[in-house]
Image (cartoon, rainbow, N blue to C red):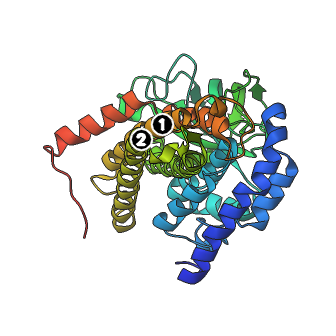
């Protein structure tokens, strides 16, 4: 449990809900226009220990378990989508690749600084012309001193308006097999040759700082190489496997709030003298929403058991992809049913029951984060074939 007792943890979940449905909602009106988080948001995240909760205790964190962390993610995802992305990233990809693959010297130098956002990261994998896998085109060439010179571009990168470091995946051996072409570097953003390039305004999840990046003869000290040269694909895939379940937990939190505000609206909306919640057609919608939410929560909790038992277990990637893929279907169904229950009122920004229109927009980012549905299906099919169609479960 880390530094929280069970009772303290339950109180903390309530604290998170009050934070995201109170101050975060109040800040979001301006963020929808500016597309930028105010300093007040980061300050309050520090006050609510957002950056400490999942960080290992040895580096100043609470060391919450994966299950506890995902329960926190579910609560935080009831609020604005961009803030949900920030919290999701802070709990996982922000520090975990460095923790799993960084040298002891680099971890000793940097890991303690994650607890108060003195260090914050960006995950730089996607490219406009090379996808998110072995077909990347950013290159890292070793010089005579054993350091690396990076050239290339990245696209659709989050948090580049406030991060201090970037996880950059680049080709170090173009002639190697696809599993060994890439290497991963943890690069300070003040490195000469590192440039942020603008992107258009986003449909939803505003404030999360999406831009492109360009690297021009950017010299990176060899100490920033994570793992071994050629280990980049492994680092990317393992790190994303865990992060995909954080996406699933995010969808779970959003879907749960959509169900709750749909129930409130259906009880309040009167047609022919009766609340529409009494209509059988509406009850069928509510039943579908609850069924998908319950199934998703069960899948997420099952993954947590596996991960806490063995982080590199045989079914981790497969179950993570299943969670993420099913969570998309869950949010698609729940958000569509929510909009039908609200009718035309749900299409407008201001609604007394909750941010219906914004939830509908924000959740669409889940289709794309940490790999599109086709990518999840490829992962699931590959491992399903390897395991002969079986799936292991822990008691």
Q: Is residue 314 left or right of residue 59?
A: left
Q: Write down the residue under mark 1.
A: 337
> Which one is in front, 96 or 220?
96
> Which one is in front, 244 or 229?
244
Position of 134 relative to 162 (above/below) = above
**Residue 18 at x, y = what percent?**
71, 63
Q: Is residue 311 left or right of residue 334?
A: left
Tell me the SS state at disc 2.
helix
**Residue 129 at x, y = what percent?**
54, 16
- The image quadrant of residue 280 is top left
> Which one is in front, 58 or 321?
321
- The image quadrant of residue 282 is top left
**Residue 7 at x, y = what percent?**
57, 82
Q: Is residue 316 left or right of residue 71?
A: left
Q: Residues within 10 Å of mark 1 (few under 14, many from 20)?
A: many
Residue that sits furthest to the left in the current view: 388
Q: How many marks?
A: 2
Could you tell me if the residues under marks 1 and 2 are in contact, i.e. CB atoms within 8 Å?
yes
Residue at coordinates 27% horizontally, 53% vertically from top-left?
A: 314
Residue at coordinates 72% horizontally, 36% vertically from top-left?
A: 206
* Lower position in the chain sequence, tag 1 or tag 2: 2
> Which quarter of the rendered picture does the C terminus lie within?
bottom left
> Does any portion of residue 344 appear in the rendered image?
yes
Position of 274 relative to 179 (above/below) = below
In the rendering, which numbered label is found on residue 285?
2
Position of 66 relative to 273 (above/below) = below
């Amino acid at each position: 449990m880390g530094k929280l007792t069970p009772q303290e943890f339950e109180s903390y979940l309530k604290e998170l809900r009050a934070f995201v449905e109170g101050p975060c909602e109040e800040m979001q009106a301006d963020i929808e226009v500016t597309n930028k988080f105010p300093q007040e948001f980061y300050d309050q995240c520090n006050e609510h220990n957002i950056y400490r909760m999942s960080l290992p205790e040895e580096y100043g964190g609470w060391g919450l378990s994966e299950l506890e962390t995902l329960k926190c993610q579910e609560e935080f995802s009831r609020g604005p989508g961009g803030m949900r992305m920030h919290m999701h990233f802070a709990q996982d990809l922000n520090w975990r690749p460095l923790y799993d693959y960084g040298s002891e010297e680099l971890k000793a130098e940097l890991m303690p600084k994650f607890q108060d956002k003195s260090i914050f990261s960006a995950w730089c994998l996607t490219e406009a012309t090379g996808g998110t896998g072995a077909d990347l085109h950013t290159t890292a060439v070793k010089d005579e001193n054993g350091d690396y010179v990076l050239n290339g571009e990245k696209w659709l990168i989050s948090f580049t308006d406030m991060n201090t470091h970037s996880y950059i995946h680049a080709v170090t051996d173009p002639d190697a097999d696809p599993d060994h072409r890439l290497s991963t570097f943890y690069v300070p953003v003040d490195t000469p040759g590192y440039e942020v390039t603008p992107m258009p305004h986003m449909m939803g999840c505003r404030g999360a700082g999406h831009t492109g990046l360009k690297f021009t003869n950017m010299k990176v000290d060899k100490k920033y190489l994570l793992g071994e040269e050629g280990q980049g694909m492994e680092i990317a895939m393992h790190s994303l496997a865990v992060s995909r379940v954080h996406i699933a937990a995010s969808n779970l939190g959003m879907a749960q709030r959509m169900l709750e505000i749909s129930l409130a609206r259906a009880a309040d909306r009167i047609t022919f003298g009766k609340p529409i919640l009494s209509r059988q057609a509406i009850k069928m919608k509510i039943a579908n929403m609850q069924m998908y939410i319950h199934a998703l929560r069960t899948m997420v909790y099952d993954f947590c058991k596996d991960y806490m038992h063995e982080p590199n277990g045989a079914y981790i990637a497969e179950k993570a992809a299943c969670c993420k893929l099913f969570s998309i279907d869950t949010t698609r169904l729940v958000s569509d049913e929510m909009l039908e229950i609200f009718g035309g009122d749900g299409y407008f920004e201001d609604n007394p029951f909750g941010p219906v229109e914004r939830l509908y927009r924000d959740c669409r980012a889940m289709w794309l984060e940490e790999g599109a549905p086709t990518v999840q299906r490829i992962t699931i099919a590959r491992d399903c074939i390897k395991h002969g169609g079986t799936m292991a479960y822990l008691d």
